Image (tube, rainbow, N blue to C red):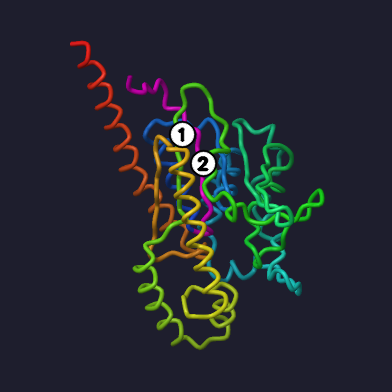
């Protein structure tokens, strides 16, 4: 018998992906525009941030704030550290968001929410489904070697994408809902390489001190150096883990948003990334709804 979906309630999982995770905003907007209702949410890294802000009812405020972000403001939000295991403390960005999204306990949110982090010491996944929302987000976004790890209960917490970049298995399900995953962890790798080599050539023509500082801290190119090689290798591993999770959980709708231009730190391009999220979501919804219509027709034909 074909699976019958009674509601448009959505259990939503949002992947890691750095700035590419801003596409989650557009995807959520398109889901709601098509009549879907998000009744629970789980996220990893940037997905934990967007999901947490959404669950707190402040997604529009977050989007408007992101419009104000340019490269100069990005630099002002970086609280540098002299530590040998990270570059940025990560406190300043959380405090900036808390100015318009007050911290709350996760259990007090209107919908179930879960953020995923990784315990570096035990090598295990850590779930946040109660306690401070922003402590959960801060732990989940702790990009290794960039943000300061979070110390909690004898754990050293880093980015959840290290273990579970698309937490389809961590979202709380309810009767009659559909499982939806939004994955921004992937790239069109060859196209991305070619595009960023072009951007590198342009950037090298700008010899200003500010540009040099930003490129060292927030690199946009893929020259062969220790940072870019490790970053690209990590990206490939995370992508494979998200593919395996999707195969394991088989979501009703998988919105796979691969990009060839935008990278981990392109937060100053929020509106373009949000637009990509909306653009990629509608065909995925149409595909799902068409499959449901076909399944229902096949079911009724058996009894004619």
Q: Quadrant of residue 145?
A: bottom right
Q: Is residue 182 above or below residue 289?
A: below
Q: Which mark is residue 179?
A: 1
Q: CA distance from mark 1 to mark 2?
A: 8 Å
Quarter of the figure that contains the N terminus: top left
The kind of secondary structure element at disc 2 is: strand
Q: Residue at x 40, y 52 (%)?
A: 257
x, y (%) of residue 68? 54, 60
Q: Which mark is residue 104?
A: none
Q: Is residue 65 above or below residue 181?
A: below
x, y (%) of residue 206? 47, 86
Q: Residue at x 71, y 63 (%)?
A: 148
Mark before the other along the chain sequence, 1 or 2: 2
Q: Residue furthest top?
A: 304
Q: Residue furthest right?
A: 154
Q: Confirm whether the magenta stretch covers residue 277.
A: no
Assess disc 1: are there few (<14), some (14-19) or many (≥20) residues with their C-alpha within 10 Å of its C-alpha.
many
Q: Which mark is residue 13?
A: 2
The magenta stretch spans which residues?
1-19
Q: Is residue 148 above or below residue 108?
A: below
Asked if residue 138 can be seen in this view, the reply is no
The kind of secondary structure element at disc 1 is: strand
Quarter of the figure that contains the C terminus: top left
Name the side, left or right, on which 188 lies relative to 119.
left
Q: Residue at x 20, y 16 (%)?
A: 301
Name the side, left or right, on which 63 lies relative to 105.
left
Asked if residue 278 can be seen in this view, the reply is yes
| Tag count | 2
Badges 1 and 2: C-beta atoms under 8 Å apart?
Answer: yes
């Amino acid at each position: 018998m074909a699976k019958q979906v009674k509601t448009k309630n959505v259990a939503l999982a949002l992947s890691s992906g750095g700035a590419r995770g801003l596409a989650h905003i557009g995807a959520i907007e398109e889901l709601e525009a098509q009549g879907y209702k998000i009744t629970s949410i789980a996220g990893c890294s940037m997905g934990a941030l967007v999901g947490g802000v959404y669950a707190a009812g402040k997604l529009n405020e977050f989007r408007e704030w992101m419009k104000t972000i340019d490269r100069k403001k990005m630099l002002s939000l970086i609280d540098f550290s002299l530590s040998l295991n990270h570059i940025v403390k990560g406190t300043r960005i959380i405090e900036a968001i808390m100015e318009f999204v007050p911290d709350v306990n996760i259990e007090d949110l209107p919908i179930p929410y879960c953020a995923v982090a990784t315990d570096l010491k035990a090598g295990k996944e850590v779930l946040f489904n109660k306690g401070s929302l922003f402590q959960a987000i801060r732990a989940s976004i702790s990009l290794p070697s960039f943000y300061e790890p979070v110390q909690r209960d004898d754990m050293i917490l880093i980015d959840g994408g290290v273990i579970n970049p698309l937490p389809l298995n961590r979202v709380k399900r309810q009767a009659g809902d559909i499982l939806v995953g939004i994955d921004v962890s992937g790239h069109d790798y060859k196209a991305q390489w070619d595009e960023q080599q072009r951007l590198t050539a342009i950037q090298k023509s700008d010899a200003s001190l500010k540009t040099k500082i930003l490129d060292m801290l927030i690199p946009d190119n893929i020259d062969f150096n220790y940072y870019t090689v490790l970053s690209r290798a990590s990206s490939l591993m995370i992508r494979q883990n998200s593919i395996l999770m999707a195969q394991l959980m088989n979501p009703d709708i998988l919105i796979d948003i691969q990009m060839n231009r935008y990278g981990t730190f392109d937060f100053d391009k929020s509106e373009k990334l949000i637009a990509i999220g909306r653009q990629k979501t509608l065909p995925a919804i149409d595909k799902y709804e068409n499959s449901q219509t076909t399944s229902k027709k096949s079911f009724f034909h058996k009894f004619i």
